Image: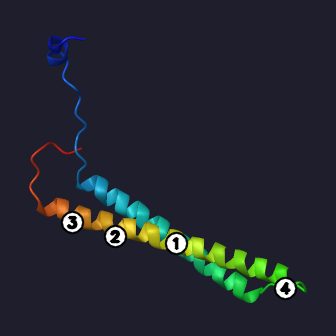
């Protein structure tokens, strides 16, 4: 390929994301966060109402560890998607108040 060929075919440019993309992403992440938070609350109530009862201390420790891991993972998913929603909301607000130099999608 010569340098003349590169000049003839311009590389396609992807359009920049606009405020509507940020808003839809923020709403989606917020909805996911709200749904996972409800699931997390129900999981905490479920495990609080049904504590593990095993005669073996090793089995008891494993059950408590798994319970803690599951509850922790659901709350991690809740707050991760919540922070994504917060970040996209702030990006949406910033995109409303800044001037665009290129065409938005």
The Cα atoms of the two marked residues, 4 and 2, are separated by 43 Å
Judging from the image, what secondary structure is the residue with disc 2 in?
helix
Which residue lies under the disc numbered 1? Answer: 76
Q: Is residue 33 left or right of residue 20?
A: right
Quick one: 32 or 11, which is closer to the camera?
11
Residue 14: horizontal and vertical position, in percent? 25, 37
Which label is found at residue 86? 2
- Mark 4 closeness class: few <14, some 14–19, many ≥20 residues within 10 Å: few
Residue 76: horizontal and vertical position, in percent? 52, 72
Query: Can you tell which of label 1 and label 4 is closer to the viewer?
Result: 4
- Sequence-first disc among 1 and 4: 4
The Cα atoms of the two marked residues, 4 and 3, are separated by 54 Å
Which residue lies under the disc numbered 3? Answer: 93
Which residue lies under the disc numbered 4? Answer: 57
Residue extending furthest toward the right: 55
Q: Residue at x 30, y 53 (%)?
A: 21
Query: Can you tell which of label 4 and label 2 is closer to the viewer?
Result: 4
The Cα atoms of the two marked residues, 2 and 3, are separated by 11 Å
Q: Quadrant of residue 83?
A: bottom left
Q: Residue at x 22, y 33 (%)?
A: 13
Q: Tally the marks.
A: 4
- Sequence-first disc among 4 and 3: 4
- Mark 3 closeness class: few <14, some 14–19, many ≥20 residues within 10 Å: some
Judging from the image, what secondary structure is the residue with disc 3 in?
helix
Which label is found at residue 65? none
- Sequence-first disc among 3 and 1: 1
């Amino acid at each position: 390929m010569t340098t003349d060929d590169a000049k003839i075919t311009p590389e396609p440019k992807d359009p920049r994301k606009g405020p509507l993309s940020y808003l839809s992403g923020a709403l989606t992440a917020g909805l996911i966060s709200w749904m996972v938070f409800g699931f997390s609350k129900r999981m905490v109530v479920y495990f609080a109402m049904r504590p593990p009862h095993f005669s073996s201390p090793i089995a008891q420790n494993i059950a408590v560890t798994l319970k803690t891991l599951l509850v922790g993972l659901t709350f991690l998913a809740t707050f991760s998607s919540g922070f994504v929603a917060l970040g996209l909301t702030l990006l949406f607000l910033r995109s409303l108040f800044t001037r665009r130099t290129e065409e938005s999608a």
